Image (spheres, rainbow, N blue to C red):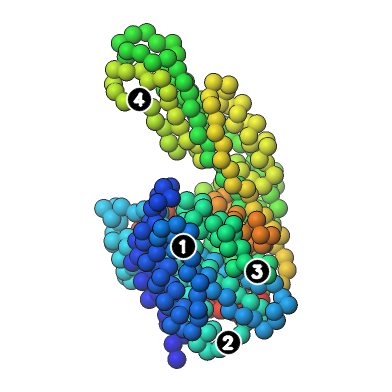
Amino acid sequence: MVTAEDEVVGLASELIRFDTSITDDPRDGNGERAAAEFVAERLADAGYAPEYVESGPRRGNVVVRLPGADPGRGALLVHGHLDVVPADPAEWSVHPFSGEVRDGYVWGRGAIDMKHMVAMSLALARRYRRESLVPPRDIVFAFLADEEAGGFQGARWLVEHRPELFDGVTEAISEVGGFSLTVRDGVRAYLVQTAEKGAVWLRLKVRGTAGHGSLVHTDNAVARLAAAVTRLDGHRFPLVLTGPMREFLHGVAELTGVPFDEADPEAAVARFGNAARLIGAALRDTANVTMFSAGVKANVVPSVASATVDGRVLPGREDEFRRTVTELLGPDVEQDWASLPPVATTFDGRLVDAMTAALVAEDPGARVLPYLLPGGTDAKAFQALGIRSFGFAPLRLPPSLDFTSLFHGVDERVPVDGLRFGVRVLDRLLRGC
Ligand SMILES: [Zn+2]
């Protein structure tokens, strides 16, 4: 009999081989159709009749429901995105779309963001159907397009146009959580995401006086915009200890024996090594300028300069963030704001208990803690349906692996052992929650 653990590594490799990279252009999604068709076929092989939905040309999504023993209980949504961010083969040790298994890892773009979870849930969905296993509650498996561009052709589109696919769903699991963080020798904390920051994309424009580059200029749009974004870049938003981060930092303090001083969370963050960047970003708002453009020729002062800022805002701080950014940029800068809301739920209930039990069963001594993700996920879209979201894509990671830098990074890879561990944990959760 083929188990999910047997299938998961092969499925992860096969999924990585579909180049599902997308950009911010909604017309890009060539590989998504092929990957979604692959998922639909694997589900159909196992006996499902999955729903294949395109939100636009080639923007494939797949949703399937496995009925549970108690239809009176809310359904659990297990979702993962099929799209990835682009990768330049010249920078990688292996081809980013090879799915190669080497040195104990599956390599490739999407290995941890997040075809590993897609492979785990697909392997389990197949097994449950093949063996007629009935989970305690309905499980809706969703394989989605476009997460890396905000989910407008994926989760967000389905929530708006096909909400009946998620009828009765009360809770969801997906990225980014369930992974281990070694806090001291052999002692692992597993981080479950219970909240995520809001995202703000801010397009800025400054208009000035155009003219010949050889003359004296006092109204240069490029220089004025550069000064404004430099002010923004120089600003440090205040430290805010949200509920999940307080619980997380106190939990780690108990595990390590190093006391946590709430007045100085940055001292605690500094002790996390590679993970410090991720954890530090969960303690304050950020606003990074990511795009800047102006001018067409060396001897022409242009009349317009524009820039884009990627802002990330802690739950409850949206108004304060907007006030501060507007003040820093000053009155000359035109601002166009597009925002996606923060997400937050509490770290309690039967599902959380089942996550903890599943992790402890596979890794005795594991400590399961909530945290806030500084990034954004499709949880934002599902929040609109009143669904409680958790980041739970279980993985046990070797202590030396710089997990944070693998997201959208070069040589993204997932440990084969970790993947097999993850499928065992996820199996316990889905059958025990
Ligand atoms: Zn992702």
Whether pointer 2 and pointer 1 mark residues with C-beta atoms closer than 8 Å, the reply is no
Identity of the residue drawn at 45% across and 80% down:
44
Whether pointer 2 and pointer 4 mark residues with C-beta atoms closer than 8 Å, the reply is no
Regarding residue 323, the answer to whether it shows in the image is yes
Residue 381 quadrant: bottom right
In this view, 90 is above or below 164: above
Gap between marks 3 and 2 measured at Cα: 22 Å
* N-terminal-most mark, 2 or 1: 1
Residues 323 and 71: in front is 71
Residue at the spot of label 4:
295
Residue at the spot of label 3:
167
Gap between marks 1 and 3 measured at Cα: 19 Å
Residue at the spot of label 1:
54
Q: Amino acid at mark 1?
A: Glu
Image spot of residue 424 (x, y percent): 53, 78
Residue at the spot of label 2:
133
Identity of the residue drawn at 69% across and 49% down:
242
In this view, 102 is above or below 325: below
Q: Is residue 399 left or right of residue 239?
A: left
* N-terminal-most mark, 2 or 4: 2
